[in-house]
Amino acid sequence: MNAAGIRCATTDDLDNLITSNAGAYVTKSATPDPRVGNPSPRMKGLPNGSINAMGLPNHGLDYYLDYVLADQKKRPDRMNFLSVAGITLDDNLQMLHTIQDSAFNGFTELNLSCPNVPGKPQVGYDFGRVQEVLTAVFDFFTKPLGVKLPPYFDMAHFDQIAAILNRYPLAFVNTINSVGNGLVINAETETAVLKPKGGFGGIGGASIKPIALANVRALRLRLNPTIAIIGTGGVVNGQDVFEHLLCGADMVQIGSKFGFEGTPLFDRLNQELSAIMATKGYTSIADFKGKLKTLD
Ligand SMILES: O=C1NC(=O)NC(C(=O)O)N1
């Protein structure tokens, strides 16, 4: 499926996704009200990925909630994900109450990892805040909900975030969001390529795959088996999908590459993954999911 933020901000984008061979879709992370986001240029394609400092531009929760409600009426058998990214805890709770009180029966993805709202730290890097948010959310929210996490880079942090997440009835954890606050420069003009935040932005694409796979594997080894894992980050071909699944992902999202290639990507990845499975004699993802071997 797509990753939140990529070709999923408008009803046209979402129509393209539901008529594609993607297994599911997720909507652009919503704030309670429409949001313009950061000034452009705020996203740049790179030779092996992308950098972005979008700043959560979106049409507001009602726009996306209306869309998924209409979709679930038309296609009750299909999975859909509604992403929310409140700037404050109150915004998140307000949006989740709206979703809880609505007829929506799909998955909610609570984005705790947007790196691009100036002055707002990523909740995912403040473990106390993560606990505060999830305690408040699960005080009332009973529908399937998962969290979108930033990448972690320290074994103790994998231990700490997993210990927190295991205390809540999460349907899934989506790991990772972009690698926050990288910097891409144009050496010829001696200028940062993005306008917002002095050019700092989230990095996506092939270069972040080792970080994404590590986070998928570390969390799969630590989270309760009742918590599914969506693997996101660095997927450009069927082998990358295979590697995410091997690390323990139950589903895979594609961001940067989907941004460049569009919906034909899903057909290509499905074909490439099927070819790899056939070569290896696997007839089902269950044959190899989570079965990464180590050298010890
Ligand atoms: O969670 C997010 N991750 C990103 O890389 N960018 C967007 C954004 O800036 O809106 N949000």
Image (tube, rainbow, N blue to C red):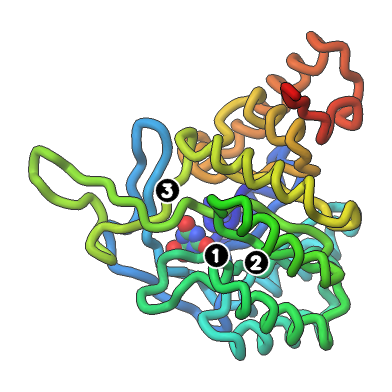
The answer for how far apart the CA atoms under marks 3 and 1 are is 13 Å
Badge 1 residue CB within 8 Å of ligand 1: yes
The quadrant of the rendering that contains the C terminus is: top right
Classify 272 as above or below 181.
above
The answer for how far apart the CA atoms under marks 3 and 2 are is 20 Å
Label drawn at residue 203: 3
Dot 3 amino acid type: Ile
Residues at badges 1 and 2 in contact (C-beta under 8 Å)? Answer: no
Would residue 122 be found to the left or right of residue 295 on screen?
A: left
Residue 62 lies, in percent from the top left, at: 64, 79
Judging by the rendered image, the residue that carries numbered circle 1 is: 113
Judging by the rendered image, the residue that carries numbered circle 2 is: 83
Q: Which of 198 and 155 is in front in this view?
A: 155
N-terminal-most mark, 1 or 2: 2
Q: In which image quadrant can residue 252 be found? A: top right
Residue 65 lies, in percent from the top left, at: 70, 73
SS type, badge 2: strand
Classify 258 as above or below 113.
above
Residue 33 lies, in percent from the top left, at: 53, 84
